[in-house]
Image (spheres, grey):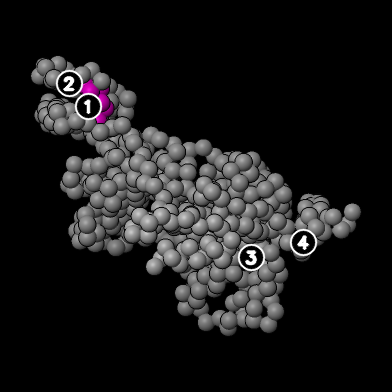
Amino acid sequence: MISDFRNRLRKQSGKPVAAQSHDDLLDPPEEIMAWERVTPDVLYETKSQVTPVESEWREKIYQQLLKVMDLSLLDSLEQAEAARQIRDICQRLLDEHSAPVSSVSRQLIIKQITDEVLGLGPLEPLLADHSVSDILVNGFASVYVERFGKLQRTDVRFRDDQHLLNIIDRIVSNLGRRIDESSPLVDARLKDGSRVNAIIPPLAIDGPSMSIRRFAVDLLNTDSLIQVGTLTPAIALLLKAIVRGRLNVLISGGTGSGKTTMLNVLSSFIPQNERIVTIEDSAELQLQQPHVVRLETRPSNIEGRGEVSQRELVRNSLRMRPDRIVIGEVRGVEALDMLTAMNTGHDGSLTTIHANTARDALGRVENMVSMTGATFPIKAMRQQIASAIDVVIQLERQEDGKRRLVSVQEINGMEGEIITMTEIFSFVRHGMGENGEVLGDYRPSGMIPAFRDVLAKRGIELPLTMFRPEWMEARQS
């Protein structure tokens, strides 16, 4: 039935339908359309798998190492020295037992034991690959990574749930936190800045689960964003002018759409002689200016005390004489204090928010302000939002894995009880390519932003031609 329906559709669209033989009629082939094809599952191989014999000797040498070496003394050694001592002892133990494995296998066994003692065990090959942006552990036998915006299954696996629990416990205990049945989930940050979330039974039904959001080692700038197609030179120039002109910016987008990367790039435009205070749940910003004060929230301790929220940090930052306040992400009642800061002379503030569209972002800010219990009239609340935020930048991670800036919108003010917005640039989609890439281009809307005059009075000139679409330019000529 489905095949017949597809053939009728092809006839209507003028596409040729292959003639069917007698055999085909008895067993008709299932012709599928391009968008129906299943994406092949490409395995990401770390080449860290061992044979049963190698695995047996790895466990044997590891147990011997625990007996002959006091691992508590490793904390007093440098990482390189500790790794050297472990390698030497493992090599000696393999020689003493005349292990029937090749020299290449011995090196692999020694490396895995070293990773087990000093690192994160089977995850070390993934952490060493800078193309991996996310590591997702769905139980001991299922590990996925995100590379170039796409998820891939890996050949990495743990021995069992207990092995995975030991690695999670090592991560958490090094950060002064704990995870057990009484406290079965934890959100923390590794020493390199990577974010870790772990959740264990009884909350995780199928065994321990962990996700690691890698900390970007290579700093991106506008040139690199232009090269990967996130934005265009005209949009990059506009964003630079917006930051230099001290406009308040809200960066909006879904999870993994590149909000923090965009915030880092925008922050790089802040002049070197300004004092910047950053406020984050988990410190990810990499500001290059010399005068930066970094603040990070603190979760409550085991007794449920000692928590320091973003709202308290935002309030405290106002007393620190900041030129700019950069909030990693606004997600709760601190939205009210952020708006207050933007409306009371702290121009040029930057922050991000989770939302699917620029309009939704303003609605989320409104909801967050309502969470404070403040009884503002709706119109008064929206007036405060409209006067505080000047520009909303919308980001999106699209089907081809690329993160793109899809809209730049200016907030104009109020009409009745509605906040009015004007789109300045947008990404217009045309469809999908043969290889699954998103087709489209960036276009100016033709609207001249009102803040162009504000920037001009501050000595920042933006040519009118950058806001005109091609058809308007052709008419002018």
**Residue occupied by mark 3:** 389
Q: Tag 2's secondary structure?
A: loop
Quadrant where the image shows the C terminus: bottom right
**Residue occupied by mark 1:** 109
Q: Return the x and y of residue 97 as percentages of the image width and height.
A: 10, 19
The residue lying at 17 percent from left, 28 percent from top is 54
Q: CA distance from mark 3 to mark 4?
A: 22 Å
The residue lying at 55 percent from left, 69 percent from top is 360
Q: Which residues are magenta?
A: 105-113
**Residue occupied by mark 4:** 446
Q: Looking at numbered disc 3 in the image, what kind of residue is underneath it? A: Ile
The residue lying at 52 percent from left, 70 percent from top is 364
Q: Earlier in the sequence, mark 3 or mark 2?
A: 2
Camera sees residue 95: yes
Classified by dominant secondary structure, the portion drawn in magenta counts as: helix
How many residues crowd around disc 1 within 10 Å: few (fewer than 14), some, or many (20 or more)? many
Q: Looking at numbered disc 2 in the image, what kind of residue is underneath it? A: Val
Q: Earlier in the sequence, mark 4 or mark 1?
A: 1
Q: Say which mark, if any, is on residue 101.
A: 2
How many residues crowd around disc 3 within 10 Å: few (fewer than 14), some, or many (20 or more)? many
Q: Earlier in the sequence, mark 4 or mark 2?
A: 2
Q: Tag 3's secondary structure?
A: loop
| Circles 2, 1 touching at the beta carbon (< 8 Å) | yes
Q: Return the x and y of residue 11 as percentages of the image width and height.
A: 54, 63
Vertical placement of residue 42 versus 247, above or below: above
The residue lying at 23 percent from left, 47 percent from top is 140
Q: Return the x and y of residue 329 as percentages of the image width and height.
A: 50, 58
